[in-house]
Amino acid sequence: MATDYHLAAAEREEQFARQQRDFEHELRTDPRYQPYLAGYAPASVEGFIKHYAAHKVDCLRKGPGMVKFRLHQAIEYQEDAYERLFDIQQKKLFDLQVRWRAGEITLPGVAVGRQFTLWERHVHACPWLPPITPAEYERYCDYLASSACQDVGHHPDHRRFDDWQDYDRMYDDWRSTQPNPPADDFLDCAPYPAWYAYDDARTGAPAGYPFATHSNHKGEREEYYRDLAIEEEQATQGPPTPYVPDPRPFYHDFDAQESFESPAGWYIDKYAQQFEAFAKAFDPEPEPLGAYHRAWLRLQNSHYSHFMQQTESSRELLWDARGPWPVAAHPDWRLGIVGAAQELHRALLLAALPAVFEDYEFRLATGLAPAAPDQFRAYHDATRPDDEDDPKQKCAVPAYLERLILRGRELAGEPRDFNY
């Protein structure tokens, strides 16, 4: 039974077919076209008429969507640039977190360190974070234009940072570089963002900032109180089931990571050895099976490997270049493509930033709240339902932390508050 959708689709198809017949009839009969078509063989004229009418209908049918798609492509750089504008606010929020952890300042409504990672998602609406200044904007543009900024384009080794307020993991990464670092089992590392380091250098931050210059008093006390409460809860629940490790080894090794520096046969060598060893031991015809397997993997290695996907994404990005765009010579042609796309992406972002910063300043001047940065939608689009919620409520002290810390304070013989 045909649904309304199928009936409407059939009606549209009939409409386009009718349009094509009308265009063909017009081309055959309207005197305006006869001088253009005169002098050509009748079969050639008929072929042109059918081709032109069909292509005209196709343009009318698909053209609006294609135009809309191109407009969306053009605005993607504005979306990306607007999101990057708030990297400035992330750095300022992190600097406040450093001072708050050291006990130098208090912040309205902030009682635990976890709240900074919550405000990271709503940094555009943080009420106690000063707005972006022209000087800060210019400094970020300088960073984006510099070689220090590598998270542009589609290089597989340079991804956008997304844990801007993860103090603990950045601290662990710093500890791993110090004399006598803790064992790796005790560290969960995330690198200090390149933008943060650039801003520190430009603003004259002291050597060793932030981890060697500021204590983590608040964070350490939180952990102490939290552990006290957790130990009490575990004591009332009885001993946990002892962990018994499985003595059997993992069959597959997933540790190795593919990169541009990997040998050409990395994909083949890593998995073919296991496959072929098993085939030789148990398959009745291992030789042809091994040959087929190697041929298949070579095709996979050529077309579906991770770094080839990044090369293809970079090639697509280069299509956005208006006019010739240089591709520097490189021993690995793939890295040449990726590098050229990185520089194009950098240039397009720098070209988009002035407009989005102007929009940001206009909103502040007229009393409008800045829109939420989101690389998946245009910054001037309608607000999403999530944005209508009060950010202060979303960034309040998590209930589980409030319970643990206040109970820990009580167990330590201290007041049930966050004044420590």
Image (cartoon, rainbow, N blue to C red):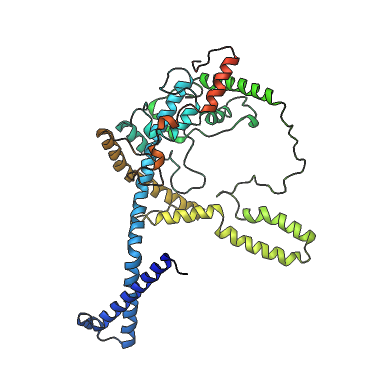
Residue 145 visible in this rendered orientation of the protein = no
Give the percent coordinates (x, y) of residue 278.
76, 57
**Residue at 44% across, 66% down:** 3
306 relative to 26, above or below: above
**Residue at 43% across, 30% down:** 393
211 relative to 331, above or below: above
Pick the front one: 172 or 63: 63
Query: As drawn, which residue projects farthest toward the front?
Result: 1
Query: As drawn, which residue projects farthest toward the top?
Result: 413
Pick the front one: 312 or 384: 384
**Image side of residue 303 versus residue 35, left or right:** right
Give the percent coordinates (x, y) of residue 414.
55, 12
Pick the front one: 222 or 51: 222
**Residue at 50% across, 25% down:** 113
**Image side of residue 57 versus residue 316, left or right:** left
**Image side of residue 166 versus residue 249, left or right:** left
Pick the front one: 301 or 244: 244
Total count of labels: 0
**Image side of residue 388 versus residue 282, left or right:** left
Query: As drawn, which residue projects farthest toward the left?
Result: 32
Give the percent coordinates (x, y) of residue 127.
36, 28
104 relative to 76, above or below: above
Residue 106 visible in this rendered orientation of the protein = yes
Query: Where, by quadrant of the figure, is residue 149 drawn?
Result: top left
Give the percent coordinates (x, y) of residue 115.
47, 28
